[in-house]
Image: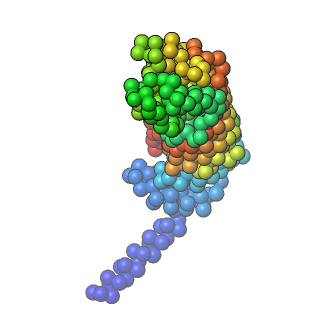
Amino acid sequence: MKFILIIFILLLKVSLLMANETKSAKDYYNDGLSKVSSGDNKGAILDFDKAIEIDPKDADSYKKRGISKATLGDYEGANQDFKKAETLSAEKPSVSKESGPNQNTPKLMTEEKKKEEEERKREEEKLKKYYAKLKNPPGFYEGAFLISFMGGTTIAPSGSYISHEKVYDQRLQGKIITNQVNQDLDPNLKGFYFQPSYKPGVATQFDFEYGWRDKIGMGFTIMQNSITAQKQDVIPGVISYANEYAEIFPSKRTIYRGTSMMFLATYHPLPKHFFDPYLAVRMGIVGFTGEAHSGIDSNRFAYTNKVNNGMGGIAGLAGGLNIYIGRFTGIKTEVAYHKEYLRADQFSTRTLNSYQAMIGFFLNFSNIQYSLEEPYRPNY
């Protein structure tokens, strides 16, 4: 009985081997289609491999294998298969396994075949869009649309806007010490004076960038930054109209808060790469508020020190790095220098120089758009 069973198993294996040897490229191709329909893309790739091994000129097998590879995330392999399918189709125009009658014989087409041909054309259009998606790897490229947000700090602000306020502080210090301004203290005692401190606030930045070329981007930037100071000042308004009164203790005040809108131009030397360094140039306008003085001495006729109608121009240079985490998003870091030319009702042009160091994230909306569209589902 065991001997008969062994003979039966051997015969079964031999028959299977013979069946496999007699299978044609078309048989393997159809087996691959069946496995794709059932969701077994790995098995389908093995069948398409066999079909290509038997018939290396079969463009359809390359195309279907490329779709299965792309479904499994092998975009580079899929890209190679699609290119090979295009090359074979161009070298040997033939009737596709799925296409029905040749387009050059429309008179012989039945209504049913015409519908099949129209369906094939729609399928090819979807495939082109799917193929275009594969041509957009992680990295910067023509047609990319990046939206980014960063936060950080301003480093070492300088310029005449800051230096003017510091000269004002020094003049006020002398007036307090010599009792030229009132603090409601014993006139025989020197006034209390504390050294002022200037601290940059948080800087935030939104970038909207479009890939005009593979290495060149265009867009615009919205940026906000601020500077605060802990210092004493003459109390403005009616209380100081006759005799100026100075604060006994320093108080925190925002001396500058600006919002700028700038044109953005970028250069990306390494397009279509996970590590995407870039250079950026920005120019635009800025509106700002805060507290500032018209002169280097206090003005007892000034009712407030708040900036009125603050406007100006801004220009900057920056260098940064985009690090892609997949195809849709990544980390963004940047160091930038900006120079601002500021005007307000209290003063004519003053300058503000600042460096920003920021970090944040970005989204590639061109790739996200493809993922949100109806996914390609071939009809077998």
Q: Is residue 272 visible?
A: no
At 41% across and 49% down in the image, what residue appears?
37
| Front residue (pair 178, 188) | 188
185 displayed left or right of 61: left
Percent of width and height locating residue 263: 63, 27
Quarter of image, res 281: top right
Q: Residue at x 38, y 52 (%)?
A: 38
Split into 4 quadrants, where in the image is the N terminus? bottom left
Residue 104 drawn at (x, y percent)? 65, 32
Q: Nearer the viewer, residue 303 or 78?
A: 303
357 w.r.t. 57: above or below:
above
Res 155 → quadrant? top right
The answer to whether residue 36 is above or below residue 49 is above
Q: Position of residue 346 (x, y in %)?
A: 57, 16
Tell me, yes or no, if residue 182 can be seen here.
yes
Report the front residue among 164 and 367. Answer: 164
Rendered position, 126 above or below 97: above
**Residue 82 point in image, percent of width and height:** 61, 48
